[in-house]
């Protein structure tokens, strides 16, 4: 698995076989993750002090990050969720399909998009394009994990948790074939 350097997750995934997979290493512990969440939460409280904030979680992976972060926040915050998936051939077309759109109108609002992991950057740059066109007051990003892969696009991530290697990871919201999301730590499969 460690030899797939500089490949996006979709390519690494095609080399994994479900029935043979198990957790190999714990990359980042529960307590490291929790203290990072507290740090980011405190920073958000400071940055948005006196302002309202709409946090948009990208399903499904961000659900654990959002629920941990939410408990730390003291600003005037509301939440909404979006679900997106890649079109086939995404790596070349750069297209992302909205499976579930927002319920709330974001115009004139401070928006913080929360995503589980930043790999090639395609998903978030596409979302930025769509959401910018809806005229928010501000639009920022938080990603729990930033992968060391070639970025097809650059994007300013205001809040980030951990920089990690290019290997495929699970846990803390991230899955492999729908499993392992519930793990309170980040792990590598083998
Ligand atoms: P990007 O558009 O930045 O290339 O990809 C972001 C999406 O790819 C994430 O939201 C996540 O769904 C998926 N992804 C990328 N790397 C990993 C990984 O190591 N593990 C899991 N479970 N999903 C990943």
Image: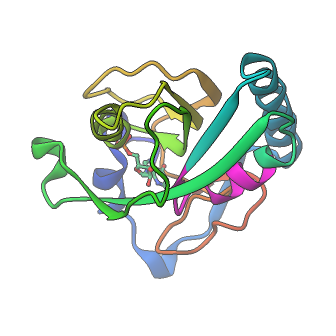
Q: Nearer the viewer, residue 84 or 167?
A: 84
Residue 170, compared with residue 121, is above or below; it is below
In the image, what residue occupies the spot 53% across and 71% down?
A: 21
The x, y position of residue 26, in whole percent, is: 73, 50
Rendering quarter of residue 64: bottom right
- Span of residues in magenta: 57-68
Quadrant location of the C terminus in the rendered image: bottom right
x, y percent for residue 72 = 87, 40
For the rendered model, the colour scheme is rainbow
Within the magenta stretch, is there residue 59? Answer: yes
Say if residue 120 shows up in the picture.
no
Q: Is residue 49 magenta-colored?
A: no
- The residue that appears at 87% across and 35% down in the rendered structure is 74
Residue plotted at (46% across, 42% down): 106
Q: Locate residue 38: give its quadrant.
A: top right
Q: Is residue 130 left or right of residue 54?
A: left
Coordinates of residue 22 in the picture (x, y in percent): 61, 69
Q: Is residue 14 above or below residue 92?
A: below
């Amino acid at each position: 698995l460690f030899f797939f350097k500089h490949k996006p997750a979709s390519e690494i995934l095609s080399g994994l076989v479900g029935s043979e997979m198990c957790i190999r290493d714990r990359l980042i512990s529960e307590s490291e993750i929790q203290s990072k969440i507290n740090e980011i939460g405190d920073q958000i409280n400071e940055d948005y002090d006196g302002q309202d904030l709409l946090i948009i979680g990208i399903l499904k992976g961000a659900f654990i990050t959002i629920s941990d972060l939410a408990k730390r926040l003291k600003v005037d915050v509301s939440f909404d969720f979006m679900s997106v998936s890649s079109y086939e051939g995404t790596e070349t077309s750069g297209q992302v399909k909205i499976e579930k759109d927002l319920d709330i109108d974001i115009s004139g609002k401070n928006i913080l998009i929360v995503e589980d992991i930043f790999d090639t950057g395609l998903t978030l740059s596409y979302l930025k394009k769509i959401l910018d066109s809806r005229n928010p007051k501000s639009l920022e990003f938080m990603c729990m994990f930033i992968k060391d892969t070639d970025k097809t696009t650059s994007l300013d991530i205001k809040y980030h948790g951990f920089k990690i290697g290019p290997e495929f990871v699970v846990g803390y919201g991230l899955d492999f074939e729908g499993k392992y999301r519930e793990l309170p730590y980040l792990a590598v499969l083998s």
